[in-house]
Image (cartoon, coloured by chain):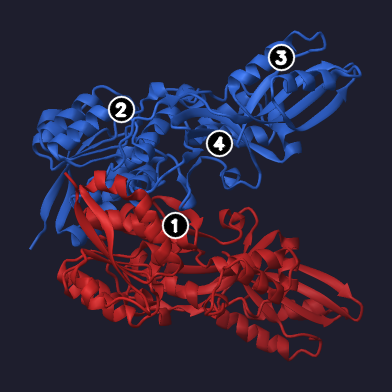
Chain colours: A red, B blue
Amino acid sequence: MPHQPYRIGLLGHGVVGSAFEALLDERKADIESATGRSPEIGGILTRSRGNFQEILERSDVIVEVMGGIEPAGTYALETLRAGKPLITANKQLLAARGSELLGLARKCEMPLRFEASVAGAVPIIRTLDGALGAAEISRVYGIVNGTTNFILSAMEDGKEYGEALVEAREAGYYGADGPTEDVSGKDAAAKMAILARLAFGVDATLDDVYADGIEELHPDDLQYARDFDMTLKLLGSATRENGRLALSVHPTFLPRTHPLAAITGPINAVTVEGEAFESITLSAPGAGGPPTASAVLGDLLAVMRGESYSLSKQATLPIVHDTTHAFYLHVEVADDPGTLSRIAGVLGDEGISIQSVLQRGLGETARLIFILHPTTRPHLQAALTTVGHLDVLRSSPRVIHVLG
Amino acid sequence: MPHQPYRIGLLGHGVVGSAFEALLDERKADIESATGRSPEIGGILTRSRGNFQEILERSDVIVEVMGGIEPAGTYALETLRAGKPLITANKQLLAARGSELLGLARKCEMPLRFEASVAGAVPIIRTLDGALGAAEISRVYGIVNGTTNFILSAMEDGKEYGEALVEAREAGYYGADGPTEDVSGKDAAAKMAILARLAFGVDATLDDVYADGIEELHPDDLQYARDFDMTLKLLGSATRENGRLALSVHPTFLPRTHPLAAITGPINAVTVEGEAFESITLSAPGAGGPPTASAVLGDLLAVMRGESYSLSKQATLPIVHDTTHAFYLHVEVADDPGTLSRIAGVLGDEGISIQSVLQRGLGETARLIFILHPTTRPHLQAALTTVGHLDVLRSSPRVIHVLG
């Protein structure tokens, strides 16, 4: 007896949509024997073909891989209102309107799943919602943008930013829309808003996440950091501290021995910390057709089995942009006796202590690189304003976060 | 209105059991608000207190963290037959009688969950069953025994095996039962049987897994391998190849750049490979009270939400002990002209090709270290038998797997 069909309405047929169609075809027999139903694409919506209402009516589930906030958002709401489950890979939509969508899904008692929206094949949404659904989490952080990780890896190998950007384009790590969302940190910020919701139960949106990108980095700083045995990553982090949640994306130095230091190229990795389980790290390809389609396929199996997320955490932690950090500070100064001590004195006056310092003579000037013990950004800013008034300064101070 | 209680019968009150009791107490309020029921320990069974039948009768779920095959197995079967869900951290039981337990759970339509049985806080069971439940997996491999990983890390730092063993005991990485299960590879083998079931749908038991331990290793080999930029791990692996499943545990050299090379001390890490998603790696503490209890707590939330595993894969792949591997080969020989060429000739005659070789003079003898391209164990064994007949040999050849 043939299996009863389970009809999938596919919104979007780009890199992920077509990879999903191919993967579904390949894995169909196994899904049939596991669920007793035969998944098939019942309709495809693209800019040039298909009608959403018709597709919705004849589908058992909608898979949205078109991206963007509209019309995807309208389609998502209509899907849930029509009493059909929704699977989406759309980080922008979830970061902008997650509460509305999840609220409607709860009201309609319809599964809404979005594993593919964050970090491609990394099963981080399920892990936060399931394995860690009853756990107390203190911090979630990681590399959630593969394009910038590829660029930073290339820059550490000595490439200029522009050169690395061209390489990333040639390797297909960003498309027609350009790399702005990636290099500005906005893409990572959207993903951190979603992760913060799952890990801490807060209602975070993209606007709640302070994002520093990688555009302003000096390749020199990546080289100098080698002397401190550090490597640079664009890290998103959500940290619970003193009853608040610090949510941000920053280029961040980390020790070469840190597990995330080994994550190079277009791979994503997320670390979750909590007192009971200490530290769990998950890594996998962060983008690309087949890996993202694989995450969508996992969601399809779950929806066919009637599984919703638990979303067991609800909290109203105030969201702040920043917390205390260790910092890397680079300045060029007149190579006079006493310069180091004057700058160290200013830092000390602001209560900022120095972990290590490296001074290199460059003829008439000297380069000073400090690694500072944890302090707040405003504290450091105040100190740098005072340093700026010293007559010994020969360059603007450059500051980069260091993982604490 | 107070929440209706959800009564947990706890079998075992050692390191994991008491950590679970403490963690449950801490996380109780959140679980209540997520599930609408109030989890509480309704009874505890230890060697000296409690009666299983009484505990079973008044419990809504049984959490078994006592270990060992009996009486845990009888209690597990009785739990499911009584129509109550079962959560277990018992790798021995699952590796020996997994089919029987899972079959009964299916027949009784009762959830049976066992995340804590493999790799502590690493959410590998859920990932294989859920995110990858519809995926085609080609290989699962990793570090699933923390005690041996600790010992190998210490040996790479120059410690003798015996010294490292004492350090592991002092750090509490093995208990009164001694380290035999760990260092013989049996503990890792039990875990690989469970992972093979989830990843490939095979009915594997402990006896199906060929296990080489770490007892016979020479610390010298760990040092020499540095010259090839490799590090040694005890790796369990399940590899689908030519319609068969190769299932084994071996000390294995891997390149220092490999993600698993960075896993040191009592941490566990598992990598899953498949064409679509490429490679997913999960790492976390592999043992210890709170991390293991955290995995049990995740299972409790799932059971309270009525979630069973999907176990969507069913296959009858023949299980074999071994597949092709690259190998490290160490021999000491008479330092005569032509010796290297004679040994290379024997290998070549068996069709084994050499990837790299290092020769060091030691006075009258020389040390030869080969890295061999992938071949089978029987092939290599045949070659070594012939090498053994050469009059130039001054030590028994030593062979260690190299990750291919």
Q: Distance between the residues labelled 1 and 2?
A: 30 Å
Residue at 69 percent of width and 16 percent of height: B384
Q: Which of A1 and A33 is in front in this view?
A: A1
Label 1 sits on residue: A122
Q: Could you say whether the residue bearing mark 2 is in a helix, strand or loop?
A: helix
Q: Which chain carries label 3?
A: B
Circle 1 packing at 10 Å, graded few (<14), some (14-19), many (20+), is: many
Label 3 sits on residue: B396
Residue at 21 percent of width and 70 percent of height: A105
User: CB of mark 1 within 8 Å of CB of mark 3?
Assistant: no
Looking at the rendered structure, the number of numbered marks drawn on it comes to 4
Q: Which chain carries label 1?
A: A
Q: Which of A327 and B139 is in front in this view?
A: B139
Between marks 4 and 1 in the image, the one whose residue lies nearer the viewer = 1
Q: How far apart are marks 4 and 2 (CA)?
A: 25 Å
Label 2 sits on residue: B93
Between marks 3 and 2 in the image, the one whose residue lies nearer the viewer = 3
Question: Which label belongs to residue B150?
Answer: 4
Co-location on one chain, circles 4 and 3: yes
On screen, residue A150 versus residue A238, left or right, reads: right
Q: How far apart are marks 1 and 3 (CA)?
A: 45 Å
Q: Give amino acid for label 3.
A: Ser
